[in-house]
Amino acid sequence: MKIICIGRNYPAHAKELNNPVPKEPVVFLKPDTALLPKSMPFFYPSFSKDIHYEAELVVKIDRVGKNISQKFAHKYYSELSVGIDFTARDLQQECKEKGLPWERAKAFDGSAPVGRFIGKDKFQTLSDLNFSLKINGELKQQGNTGNMLFSIDAIIAYVSQFFTLKIGDLIFTGTPEGVGPIAINDSFEAFLEGEKVLDLKIK
């Protein structure tokens, strides 16, 4: 399986990092080793001093597809969750300054914890889904799919031009504003439409 991530998909987040708002999806990948095993804590890596959290709605692909039309994209997934795109912001800045790819900063082991998946048929609409992240009980991020630049189905149509989507692939659909640094002993809770889907400790 592979993890496909969409950057800058919420205008307010692009602005908070002083990035331009994109005209088409910004795509990067994480390997399967970025998926944090269930019930495991996230261990702060020794190669960074500035790891940031980015909470995102995550879509699980359940059919093989290539060059998928946007109008048929809804047939290729049936479950959603919330995940965290952990980012080594210091390494990312260094890569940006040198014009280098981001993988060191985004795709390291354990950098993609994902919560429990919920069937999409539980929700009335996918264009008005709320998700949120609390750290140590304090609300840090709130997102709504209605604020996405590119919808779930638009993302699937776009990325399937370049990558064949396979069963079990995950798509991180972008983070809203409110990202920030993590600290050892932090406790994370992520929610999808008010239902807790992820509990995570930082060690």
Image (tube, helix red, strand yellow):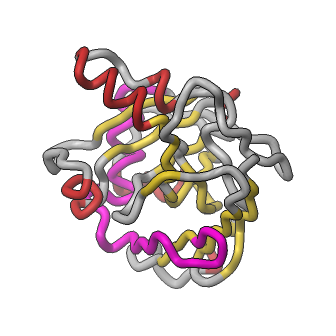
Question: Is residue 161 found left or right of 76 in the rendered image?
Answer: left
Q: Is residue 167 visible?
A: no
- Residue occupying the point 32% across, 30% down: 93
Answer above or below: position of 156 versus 201.
Answer: above
Residue 32 % position (x, y): 67, 29
Q: Nearer the viewer, residue 97 or 60?
A: 97
Q: Can residue 164 be found in the magenta stretch?
A: no
Q: Can residue 157 be found in the magenta stretch?
A: yes
- Residue occupying the point 83% across, 46% down: 40
Answer above or below: position of 56 versus 126.
Answer: above
Question: Is residue 8 found left or right of 3 in the rendered image?
Answer: left
> Would you identify the image quadrant in which residue 26 lies?
top left
- Residue occupying the point 59% across, 27% down: 108
Residue 153 % position (x, y): 39, 55
Q: Nearer the viewer, residue 107 or 49?
A: 49
Answer above or below: position of 53 versus 6.
Answer: below
Q: Quadrant of the N terminus?
A: top right
Magenta range? 134-163
Residue 106 % position (x, y): 49, 32
Question: Is residue 164 found left or right of 20 in the rendered image?
Answer: right
